[in-house]
Amino acid sequence: MNLIDRVAALEAELKNAQARTADEVERFRVAMLGRNGAVTELFDAFRQVAPEEKRTLGPRMNQLKQLAQQRLEELKGALGSEAESGSDDLDLSAPARTGHMGSLHPITIVRQRIVDVFTRIGYTVSQGPEVEDDRHNFSALNFPPDHPARDMQDTFFVQGGDLALRTHTSSVQVRVMESGKPAIRTISPGRVYRNEAISARAHCMFHQVEALYVDEGVSFADLKGTLDYFTKSLFGPEVSIRMRPSYFPFTEPSAEVDMSCTVCGGTGCNLCKHSGWVEIMGCGMVDPAVLANCGIDPERYSGFALGMGVERITQLIYRVPDLRMYWENDVRFLDQFTAGTFRS
């Protein structure tokens, strides 16, 4: 069943929905609008459709969500009317039941915001295993066994060194290039692992979002335009970027990306170490050797890749002073992110 048919079927189901008790109303809400509800799953599937289909299907999806919310309110209203008209057991003097309102983790909030920025311009979301083999994590990405760049990603090996916890989500990009043909436009969010000393600025486990675009005629100008769009979408139209030459084995040329400091506006402060700039990610044009390793003709196709640490972006958005606070499960800290906001 295609997406349009699924929308039509769900519309009919919503119109015929009935609920006689408060528990049934709650089950309806969870089944339709909950985290794993039918409407929510349709919107997850909607992210994967082509941009031209989104333009025609988008209004229908919004109408579906409005219908689900309207039907939920109608069921609640009908339930309330019955209670007011027919129950002698209703004790209006009883205290209201209250519960603690939970919240999403700040890493989850920012990761979803990053994903939303890229899916709006046609990127799909790709996932891969967290335990990887040498080819996908290193060799296919231009890390030969004796290459000194491997020392920069000292890893957690398992099963006698044959497998390792992935050190970047670039391994997902290799799998995408091996299994598909250009044009490829995808992002790969996920956890990665490196043998780092845990401190206020580093941890042995963190989250990345990497983006890959491969097609005919992709240039460095496309990369810079995408970076400018991303930073302005996430941090506001007033920010600017600069790119500094750098080195990554899988891209050539490579660059580090700095963003104008959002705290001081570029005049200098403690966050930007009085430079006016804050480093946010690395990027570059995909090395032709990597394309060839993945079965893509480097004479015909080119591409760019970029990657960022979600914890770092979260620190810049919410001014979190110590990276370890993300993992201490202190409710006093996590409660500040209710509804995706942060109270400083």
Image (cartoon, grey):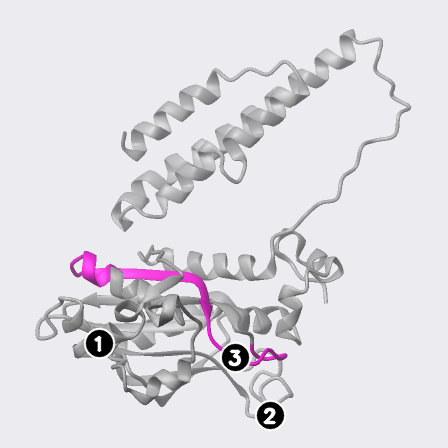
For residue 107, which numbered disc appears in the image? none
Name the residue located 62 percent from the left edge and 27 percent from the top edge. Answer: 26
Using the numbered discs, state the Cα–Cα distance from disc 2 to disc 1 in whole angstroms.
33 Å
Nearest to the eye among marks 1 and 3: give it.
Answer: 3
**Which residue position is annotated with label 1?**
219
Query: Which image quarter: residue 109?
Result: bottom right
Q: Quadrant of the C terminus?
A: bottom right
* Element marked by disc 1: loop
Amino acid, disc 2: His
Are discs 2 and 3 less than 8 Å apart at CB? Answer: no
Percent position (x, y) of residue 94? 89, 25
- Magenta-drawn segment: 176-202
- State the SS at label 2: loop
Say which label, 1 or 3, has the lower sequence index: 3
Is 183 contained in the magenta span?
yes
Neighbours of disc 1 within 10 Å: few (<14), some (14-19), many (20+): some
- Looking at the image, residue 184 sits to the left or right of residue 130; the answer is left
Asked if the residue under mark 1 is in contact with the one under mark 2, i.e. CB atoms within 8 Å, the reply is: no
> How many marks can you see?
3
Mark 2 highlights which residue? 274
Q: Is residue 126 magenta?
A: no
Q: Quadrant of residue 305?
A: bottom left
- Distance, label 2 to label 3, CA atoms, is 26 Å
Estimate the x, y position of residue 65 in percent, counting from the top left.
48, 34
Q: Which residue is mark 3?
A: 196
| Label located before the other in sequence (2 or 3) | 3
Give the amino acid at mark 3.
Glu
Q: Is disc 2 surrounded by few (<14), some (14 to 19) or many (20+) residues within 10 Å? A: some
